[in-house]
C-alpha cells in the first residue's frame, strides 16, 4: 500500500470507531479528502485507495487540477468564493460548502439560473465570531434565512464550520455542538431541513463525528503536512 493509502485506512477506522462510540452508523459519515497544495499525482493515490470525494479551497488551483484526474470524482469547494469566479466553478463541483454571505448566495442563484443549474450549497457559519474568518454571523444567518430560502436555484444542504484552532481536539467539541444545535434551531424556525453538517479536520474529525458530522474534511492526515 502507498503511504496515502495507509493513512486513509487509519482515518477510515478512526471515523468508524468514533461513530460506534456515539451510536452512529459510520456509513452516515462521508470522508472528503482536502487536496489543496498537493499534485494530481498524489491525489491519484487517494483515488486508487477508493476515495471519490475531494475538496479544494482555491478555484484557480482546483480548475487546474481537476482535468488531470478521473472525471467520476466528486468535488466540493470549501474556500471563500469570489462572485466573479462562480461561472467557472459551478459546472465543475458537486457542492459549494463555503457560501458565507447573502450577496454571494444571490450571485450563485443568478448564475445558476443563467446556466440551468441547481447547485448544492452549505452555509458557512462563523461559530466563534472571529473577525479573521469568513462565514455568517449566527444572528445574521437567522435574520437572512428567509431570503436565502427564497433563492429557488439553491439546494441548501446544511451547515459548515471551521472552529478556531485549539490546542487539543477536545477544544473543538463545543463548536461542533453549537453548529448542530444551531442547525436544529434554524430548522425549527424555518421548517426547512438542513441534513448535512460539514465539520472536523485532521486534528479533530473524530470529535466532530461524535457530535454529528455527516462530512469530515481531512487534508494533512491523509496527504501529509503542507
Ligand atoms: C485546509 C482545509 C481543511 C483540511 O485541513 P487539515 O487540517 O489539513 O485536515 C479543511 N477545511 C477547510 C475549509 C480547509 O481550508
Image (cartoon, rainbow, N blue to C red):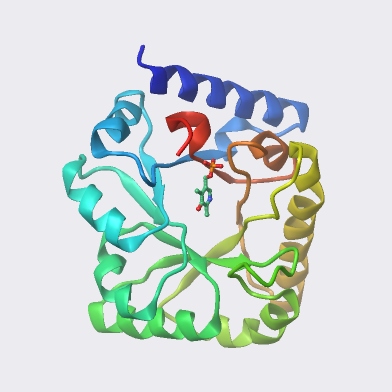
Residue at 39% across / 42% down in the picture?
35
Q: Quadrant of residue 162?
A: bottom right
Vertical arrangement, residue 127 with respect to residue 13, above or below: below
Residue at 25% across / 38% down in the picture?
40
**Identity of the residue furthest to the left in this view:** 67
Number of marks in the rendered image = 0
Relative to 102, 54 lies left or right: left
Q: Residue 197, percent across and down? A: 62, 54
Nearer to me, 143 or 190: 143
Instruction: Name the quadrant of the C terminus.
Output: top left
Vertical arrangement, residue 136 with respect to residue 165, above or below: below
Nearer to me, 116 or 15: 15
Relative to 210, 3 lies left or right: left
Q: Residue 78, percent across and down? A: 47, 57
Q: Quadrant of residue 23?
A: top right
Vertical arrangement, residue 54 with respect to residue 90, above or below: above
Q: Residue 211, percent across and down? A: 75, 44
Q: Quadrant of residue 131?
A: bottom right
Relative to 152, 149 lies left or right: right
Nearer to me, 200 or 215: 200
Q: Residue 173, percent across and down? A: 79, 46
Residue at 24% across / 57% down in the picture?
63
**Identity of the residue furthest to the top in this view:** 1
Residue at 58% across / 21% down in the picture?
13
Instruction: Name the quadrant of the N terminus.
Output: top left
Amino acid at each position: 500500500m502507498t503511504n496515502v493509502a495507509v493513512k486513509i485506512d487509519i482515518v477510515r477506522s478512526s471515523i468508524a470507531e468514533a461513530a460506534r462510540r456515539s451510536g452512529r452508523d459510520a456509513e452516515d459519515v462521508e470522508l472528503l479528502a482536502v487536496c489543496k497544495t498537493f499534485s494530481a499525482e498524489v491525489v491519484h493515490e487517494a483515488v486508487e485507495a477508493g476515495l471519490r470525494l475531494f475538496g479544494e479551497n482555491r478555484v484557480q488551483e482546483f480548475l487546474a487540477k481537476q482535468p488531470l484526474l478521473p472525471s467520476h470524482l466528486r468535488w466540493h469547494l470549501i474556500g471563500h468564493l469570489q462572485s466573479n469566479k462562480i461561472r467557472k466553478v459551478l459546472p465543475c463541483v458537486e457542492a459549494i460548502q463555503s457560501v458565507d454571505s447573502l450577496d454571494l448566495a444571490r450571485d450563485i442563484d443568478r448564475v445558476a439560473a443563467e446556466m440551468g443549474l441547481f447547485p448544492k450549497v452549505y452555509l458557512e457559519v462563523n461559530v466563534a465570531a472571529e473577525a479573521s474568518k469568513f462565514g455568517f454571523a449566527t444572528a445574521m444567518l437567522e435574520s437572512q434565512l428567509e431570503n436565502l430560502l427564497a433563492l429557488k436555484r439553491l439546494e441548501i444542504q446544511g451547515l459548515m464550520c471551521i472552529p478556531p484552532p485549539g490546542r487539543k481536539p477536545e477544544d473543538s467539541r463545543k463548536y461542533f455542538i453549537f453548529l448542530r444545535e444551531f442547525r436544529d434551531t434554524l430548522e425549527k424556525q424555518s421548517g426547512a431541513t438542513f441534513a448535512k453538517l460539514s465539520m472536523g479536520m485532521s486534528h479533530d474529525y473524530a470529535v466532530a463525528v461524535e457530535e454529528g458530522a455527516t462530512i469530515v474534511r481531512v487534508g494533512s492526515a491523509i496527504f501529509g503536512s503542507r
